[in-house]
Amino acid sequence: MITITIKGLSKEAHQALKKRAATHGRSLNTEAIAVLESSVRSQPVDNEALIQRARQFRNSLKFKVTAADLKHFKGEGRA
């Protein structure tokens, strides 16, 4: 097992990590390990595939949203 020390962590980051640990029912140390491991194992996003999936989903909907609809929604504070 390898041990590391994290120096210079801001109070805000520390509090956010503590809150996240509590949400997940983990200790602060276990949460820090989970965050680090998740970060280094992340796969790059295939933007084209993501856009294609979004288009397929949009086309599968039974309704269509127009630019005018979006403008109206934004005016209502819904976007």
Image: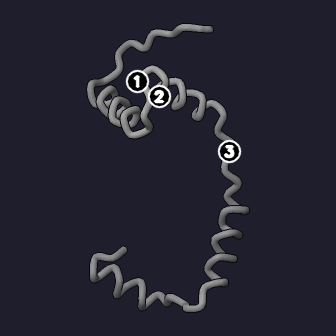
Q: Identify the mark nearer the N-term, 3 or 1.
A: 1
Mark 2: amino acid: Glu
Quadrant of the rendering where the N terminus is positioned: top right
Residue nearest the observer in this picture, 46 or 23: 23
Say the numbered circle drawn on residue 44. Answer: 3
Residue where numbered disc 1 is placed: 28
Quadrant of the rendering where the C terminus is positioned: bottom left
**Nearer mark to the viewer, of 3 and 1:** 1
At which x and y percent is residue 65?
A: 50, 88
> SS at mark 3?
loop
At which x and y percent is residue 39?
A: 58, 33
- Tell me whether circle 1 and circle 2 mark residues in contact (CB < 8 Å): yes
**Nearer mark to the viewer, of 3 and 2:** 2
Using a 10 Å C-alpha cutoff, classify the residue at mark 3 as few (fewer than 14 neighbours), some (14 to 19) or many (20 or more).
Answer: few
Mark 3: amino acid: Pro
> SS at mark 1?
helix
Q: Identify the mark nearer the N-term, 3 or 2.
A: 2
Residue nearest the observer in this picture, 41 or 68: 41
Q: Quadrant of residue 9?
A: top left
Name, please, the residue furthest toward the front: 25
Residue where numbered disc 2 is placed: 31
Q: CA distance from mark 1 to mark 2?
A: 5 Å
Q: Quadrant of residue 37?
A: top right
Q: CA distance from mark 3 to mark 2?
A: 23 Å
Q: Residue at x 61, y 80 (%)?
A: 58
Q: Is residue 50 above or below residue 36?
A: below
> SS at mark 2?
helix
Q: Quadrant of residue 3?
A: top right
Q: Is residue 60 above or below residue 31?
A: below
Q: Residue at x 69, y 69 (%)?
A: 53
